[in-house]
Image (cartoon, rainbow, N blue to C red):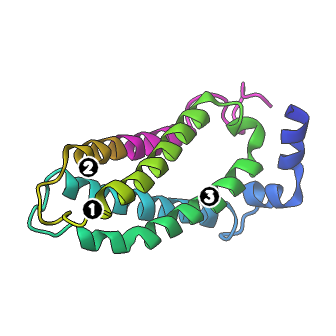
């Protein structure tokens, strides 16, 4: 398996991503990954906070129009995250923190979808108090996204680290 991961890293595209001095390589890919996360987690966080009682005068139903933007953010993250993973496969895929991050990302996505069906499909979403189910989903969503972002950031510092003495290479 490590041979396969090493071959992924040796592909010309992977080498370009990690070693190019071009602004269009690693810096732009990482920037786009951050933008994607801001779209999916940031907008979802605003919805979560509204469901938890913040800005209670703001109607909930119009937030549903933001789902395409959140899905676009997730698509950006899927593409840029895959590129970053392939470029550094032996480091990322041997780091337990990566798997922690992925559990929280997919948990957040699952909750995002569940929230749409359980909260936004309720015809009385803005007429009745926010349900306990909606509040639980919102709280769990905040936990998932905060944990995914934290675990993602910790990838640079926990476990095998690319290019540092004592790393797996």
Instruction: Look at the numbered disc 2 and give the secondary structure of its residue.
Output: helix
Of all residues shown, which one is farthest toward the front? 123
Task: List the residue tagged with mark 2.
Answer: 134
Task: List the residue tagged with mark 3.
Answer: 78
Q: Quadrant of the N terminus?
A: top right
Q: Residues within 10 Å of mark 3 (few under 14, many from 20)?
A: some
Q: Nearer the viewer, residue 109 or 88?
A: 109
Residue found 10% across the figure and 61% down from its top: 56
Q: How many circles with numbers are drawn on the protein?
A: 3
Q: Nearer the viewer, residue 69 or 3?
A: 69
* Viewer-nearest of discs 3 and 2: 2
Tell me which numbered mark, 2 or 1, is placed earlier along the sequence.
1
Question: For the magenta stretch, what is the residue range?
Answer: 143-169
Q: Is residue 125 left or right of residue 74?
A: left
Residue 157, disc: none
Q: Nearer the viewer, residue 137 or 127?
A: 127
Tell me which numbered mark, 3 or 2, is placed earlier along the sequence.
3
Task: List the residue tagged with mark 1.
Answer: 122
Q: Is residue 115 left or right of residue 91?
A: left
Instruction: Look at the numbered disc 1 and give the secondary structure of its residue.
Output: loop
Instruction: Look at the numbered disc 3 and give the secondary structure of its residue.
Output: helix
2 and 1 marks in contact (CB < 8 Å): no
> How far is disc 2 from disc 1 in space, using C-alphas?
11 Å
Tell me which numbered mark, 1 or 3, is placed earlier along the sequence.
3
Q: Quadrant of the C terminus?
A: top right
> How far is disc 3 from disc 2 in space, using C-alphas?
27 Å
> How far is disc 1 from disc 3 in space, using C-alphas?
30 Å
Q: Nearer the viewer, residue 47 or 37?
A: 47
Q: Position of residue 166 (x, y in %)?
A: 72, 24
Q: Position of residue 19 (x, y in %)?
A: 76, 56
Of all residues shown, which one is farthest toward the top? 166
Residue found 83% across the figure and 61% down from its top: 13
């Amino acid at each position: 398996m490590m041979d396969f991961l090493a071959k992924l890293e040796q592909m010309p595209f992977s080498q370009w991503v990690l070693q190019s001095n071009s602004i269009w390589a690693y810096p732009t890919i990482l920037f786009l990954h951050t933008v994607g996360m801001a779209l999916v987690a940031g907008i979802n966080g605003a919805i979560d906070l509204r469901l938890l009682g913040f800005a209670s005068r703001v109607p909930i139903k119009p937030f549903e129009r933001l789902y395409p933007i959140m899905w676009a953010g997730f698509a950006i993250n899927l593409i840029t995250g895959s590129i970053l993973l392939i470029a550094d496969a032996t480091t990322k895929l041997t780091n337990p923190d990566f798997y922690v991050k992925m559990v929280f990302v997919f948990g957040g996505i699952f909750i995002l979808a569940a929230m749409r069906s359980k909260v936004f499909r309720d015809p009385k979403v803005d007429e009745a108090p926010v349900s306990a189910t909606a509040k639980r989903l919102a709280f769990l969503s905040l936990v998932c996204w905060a944990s995914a972002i934290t675990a993602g950031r910790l990838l640079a510092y926990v476990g095998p680290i690319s290019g540092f003495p004592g790393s797996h290479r």
